[in-house]
Image (cartoon, rainbow, N blue to C red):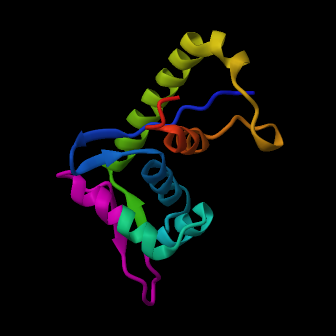
Amino acid sequence: MTQTVRFRVDFTTSCSIGPGKVALLEGIARTGSLRQAARALGMSYRRAWLLLDQINQSFNTPSATATVGGAGGGGAALTPFGEELIERYRALERTIESLSRETLAPLAPRARAGPHGKAASPSGTRRRLSRTAGRGD
């Protein structure tokens, strides 16, 4: 079983970046299209457009630009800032994963397997805890 780290960086209360936004930016870089990036991630075009707009509004420099379709077709491309955002986020992710393996490895054998051999989800734990909360157990 391999542990996984998922994290979000909150720069301010209205500016954050996490795995979903970074994956969208990487999809745009790979495909040159917001629509294709959304499709590859299994999200609607509208959701992808809203996420990209949120990223661009969160920083004083846009992370991607989009051109409208037409005779030449539309497209999307990362700005140098968008490329840097991905690069720095992924570098931090590698550092955190390495530190997590080093720090938490002794605890990994104690993790219970969930359905289909996967580790139990934190949300399931939260539900169990919330049902017993306040009962004094």
Quadrant of the rendered image containing residue 42: bottom right
Q: Give the residue displayed 37% in from the left and 81% down from the top.
A: 68
Q: Nearer the viewer, residue 109 or 84?
A: 109
Q: Nearer the viewer, residue 80 or 37?
A: 37
Looking at the image, residue 131 lies above or below residue 39: above
Instruction: Judge from the rendering whether residue 12 lies leftward or rightward of residue 113; answer left or right.
Output: left
Q: Residue furthest front?
A: 136
Q: Give the residue displayed 42% in from the left and 45% down from the top.
A: 18
Q: Residue furthest left?
A: 60
- Magenta extent: 52-75
Quadrant of the rendered image containing residue 25: bottom left
Residue 88 image position (x, y, % from top left): 38, 34
Q: Nearer the viewer, residue 98 or 117?
A: 117
Residue 106 is inside the magenta segment: no
Query: Looking at the image, how many numbered discs can be counted on the residues?
Result: 0
Residue 6 image position (x, y, % from top left): 51, 37
Looking at the image, residue 98 lies above or below residue 17: above
Q: Nearer the viewer, residue 116 or 131?
A: 131
Residue 64 image position (x, y, % from top left): 34, 59
Q: Residue furthest bottom?
A: 71
Instruction: Judge from the rendering whether residue 121 lies leftward or rightward of residue 58; answer left or right.
Output: right
Q: Give the residue displayed 48% in from the left and 57% down from the top.
A: 24
Q: Quadrant of the N terminus?
A: top right
Looking at the image, residue 102 lies above or below residue 117: above
Instruction: Judge from the rendering whether residue 98 lies leftward or rightward of residue 9; answer left or right.
Output: right
Q: Give the residue displayed 51% in from the left and 16% down from the top.
A: 99
Residue 31 image position (x, y, % from top left): 55, 62
